[in-house]
Image (tube, rainbow, N blue to C red):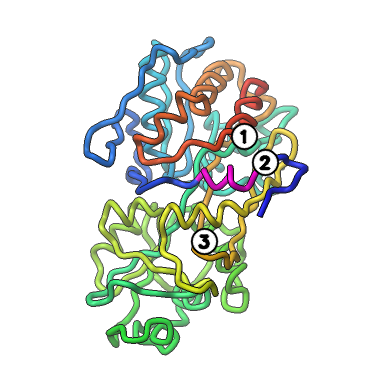
């Protein structure tokens, strides 16, 4: 399946957004940008800072948002600060909703979000972006895993309907007939399900909601655009790291978070029955097949993507997200604009994208990166 000709982008290119291996992400809410992300072999990652163009960068730049990209930000910030003397960039991984709120209140120069801005958020941004608006610039993508802890059950299969009912407190026992039907032969206990969700506003929550609203419309009646948890019941934890820790520590639990949190915490993940020939596991490769169906819905300097959450393609994992950097296309503060542009020029540059591999992320596909590289210098 190809992207629309209007946008001139190949679907195969967007598929490359997906993480090629487990993401190693930091705890949500941390603002320690000095930490160096670890490679998958346990060593640390570094990049030569000498080729980074500071281009007038100076002083302090504040940013906040998605925890899914926090380790990438830590790496980028460390390299950029090493090259640009006297510059301090502080990125707080407080969740997508918190980042957008700070951005639209003029508290940060840019925000990270796992979902593109909603229309009302774009409208709100015009108060801060004098003469302009907030635009979505994609940086990286990957799968959202449904993690669980259930003794004796290593290969749990669920479909969109059962996931919706579990998180909506309509399926409350692990041996519910709907779960048993999807897992013939599994020794499902007659015990309560402990469902965990995010307590903070989150693009991860929103992407899960979009998936459930699309693939299980009859069972998930909540607002698909909600970044705050919309359903009743369940237990809340802060950030993806908080949900993952809760699931890891509680027998009979289930929750959702980026795949890296499942990998780093050794949490079992659900395979999704999408209607394809076989259930689809939460892997980067399988998520790439779903992201390959994405289309660019943004116009002008906005590069927001539309994801196909209802895909039934063989081997396509449907619960995915793409992380954006959100900045004003016009109306940025004069004192921070040079640093903003220089930093984003670096993060989307070949060098900036190349270092993502060692941090467990995947670089942007060439055509998407080229589009973002053309936009960043025009920010004003």
- Alpha carbon distance from label 1 to label 2: 7 Å
In the rendered image, residue 8, in percent from the top left (x then y), is placed at 72, 39
**Which residue is drawn at the image coordinates 47% and 50% (left, top)?**
142
Mark 2 Cα within 10 Å, few/some/many (few <14, many 20+)? some
Please name whichever residue, 44 or 130, is drawn nearer the observer in this view of the structure. 44
**Residue 378 screen position, x and y as percent:** 67, 22
Residue 202: within the magenta? Answer: no
Compared across the picture, whether 217 is left or right of 85 comes to: right
Locate residue 379 relative to residue 275 in the image: left or right.
right
Asked which secondary structure carries label 3, the reply is: loop
Q: CA distance from mark 3 to mark 2?
A: 20 Å
Q: Regarding mark 2 in the picture, which secondary structure is present there?
A: loop
| Image point (38%, 16%), residue name | 49
Q: Which residue is mark 3?
A: 316
Q: Which residue bears the numbered disc 1?
A: 367
| Of 344 and 126, the residue lying toward us | 344
Region of the chain picked out in magenta, as a range? 9-17
- Give the vertical position of 221 relative to 358 (above or below): below
Q: Earlier in the sequence, mark 3 or mark 1?
A: 3
Q: Is residue 1 left or right of residue 41?
A: right
Residue 377 numbered mark, or none:
none
Disc 2 target residue: 9
Q: CA distance from mark 3 to mark 1?
A: 22 Å
Decide whether residue 10 is among the magenta residues. Answer: yes
Q: Name the residue nearer the viewer: 363 or 217.
A: 363
């Amino acid at each position: 399946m190809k992207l629309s000709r209007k946008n001139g982008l190949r679907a195969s290119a967007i598929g490359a957004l997906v993480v090629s291996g487990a993401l190693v992400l930091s705890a949500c809410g941390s603002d320690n940008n000095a930490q160096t992300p670890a490679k998958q072999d346990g060593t640390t990652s570094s990049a030569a800072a000498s080729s980074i163009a500071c281009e007038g960068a100076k002083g302090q730049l504040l940013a906040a948002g998605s925890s899914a990209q926090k380790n990438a930000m830590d790496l980028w910030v460390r390299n950029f600060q090493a090259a640009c003397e006297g510059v301090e960039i502080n990125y707080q991984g407080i969740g997508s909703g918190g980042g957008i709120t700070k951005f639209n209140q003029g508290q940060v120069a840019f925000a990270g979000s796992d979902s593109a801005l909603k229309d009302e958020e774009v409208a709100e941004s015009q108060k801060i972006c004098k003469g302009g608006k907030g635009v979505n610039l994609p940086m990286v993508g990957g799968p959202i895993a449904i993690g669980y802890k259930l003794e004796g059950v290593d290969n749990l299969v669920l479909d969109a309907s059962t996931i919706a009912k579990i998180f909506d407190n309509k399926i409350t026992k692990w041996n519910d007939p709907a779960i048993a039907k999807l897992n013939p032969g599994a020794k499902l206990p007659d015990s309560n399900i402990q469902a965990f969700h995010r307590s903070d506003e989150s693009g991860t929550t929103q992407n899960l909601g979009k998936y459930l609203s699309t693939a299980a419309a009859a069972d998930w009646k909540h607002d698909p655009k909600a970044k705050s948890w919309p359903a009743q019941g369940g237990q809340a934890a802060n950030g993806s790291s908080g949900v993952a820790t809760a699931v890891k520590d509680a027998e009979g639990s289930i929750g959702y978070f980026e795949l890296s949190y499942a990998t780093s915490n050794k949490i079992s993940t659900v395979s999704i029955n999408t209607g394809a020939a076989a259930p689809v596991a939460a892997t980067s490769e399988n998520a790439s097949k779903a992201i390959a169906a994405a289309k660019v819905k943004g116009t002008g300097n906005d590069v927001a993507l539309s994801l196909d959450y209802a895909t039934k393609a063989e081997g396509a994992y449907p619960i995915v997200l793409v992380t954006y950097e959100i900045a004003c296309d016009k109306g940025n503060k004069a004192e921070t604009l040079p640093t903003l542009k220089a930093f984003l020029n670096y993060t989307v540059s070949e060098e900036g994208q190349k270092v993502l591999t060692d941090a467990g992320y995947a670089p942007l596909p060439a055509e998407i990166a080229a589009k973002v590289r053309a936009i960043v210098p025009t920010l004003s």
